[in-house]
Image (tube, helix red, strand yellow):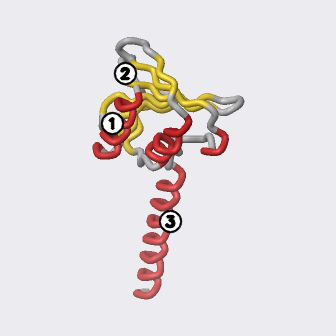
Amino acid sequence: MKRRGLLIGFIVICVIVLGIIFYLQMTKTNVLHISREDVIRIYIVDGNTGNITDIEENYFDEIYEALDSLKLSNKMKVNSTGWNKKIVICDDTNAEELIINTSTKIILSGYFYDIDSEQGEKILNIINKLS
């Protein structure tokens, strides 16, 4: 009887651990769905003025790597329309938009995500340098 209880406990723990692993893998959100090799244009839109700045191709790697390394967490539906900077990355057929709301929040596909403040500051510094 004692063995049976241990076996059931072990199975329950395994199911919980596998469920957590599965959940974490399924909720991972890729920031970019365009490969770096396919990027033909990147531009930045200022949310306050509407000014559009085309980014020179020699800065594509820097921006792409900074965005691709973002770790997203705490997905929440957007209830606000104000934003700081929007980055648009284009290939031949698609354009992906990523809105930098603050150094700790981005908007992607209609959802707020929390990001690490150091990563957010790095991206904002790159954007401010180029726009």
Q: Quadrant of residue 74?
A: top left
From this view, report whether residue 27 is shown above or below residue 40.
below
Within 10 Å of disc 1 (Cα), the crowding (few <14, some 14-19, many 20+) is few
- Residue beneath the point at 53% across and 45% down: 30
The image shows residue 43 at horizontal and vertical percentages of 51, 26
Camera-side mark, 3 or 2: 2
Q: Nearer the viewer, residue 62 or 9?
A: 62
Q: Secondary structure at mark 2?
A: loop
Coordinates of residue 55 in the picture (x, y in percent): 50, 29
Which SS class for mark 1?
helix
The amino acid type found where label 2 is placed reads Trp
- Helix, strand or loop for disc 3: helix
Mark 2 → mark 1, Cα distance in angstroms: 16 Å
Residue under label 3, please give it: 18
The answer to whether residue 79 is above or below residue 93 is above
Q: Quadrant of the C terminus?
A: top left
Towards the viewer: 82 or 23: 82
Mark closest to the chain's N terminus, 3 or 1: 3
Residue at left offset 35%, top offset 28%: 101
> Residue 125 got which mark?
1
Q: Nearer the viewer, residue 31 or 67?
A: 67
Residue in front for this viewpoint, 26 or 82 = 82
Q: Position of residue 70 (x, y in %)?
A: 43, 46
Q: Which residue is mark 2?
A: 83
The reply to whether dot 3 and dot 2 touch (C-beta < 8 Å) is: no
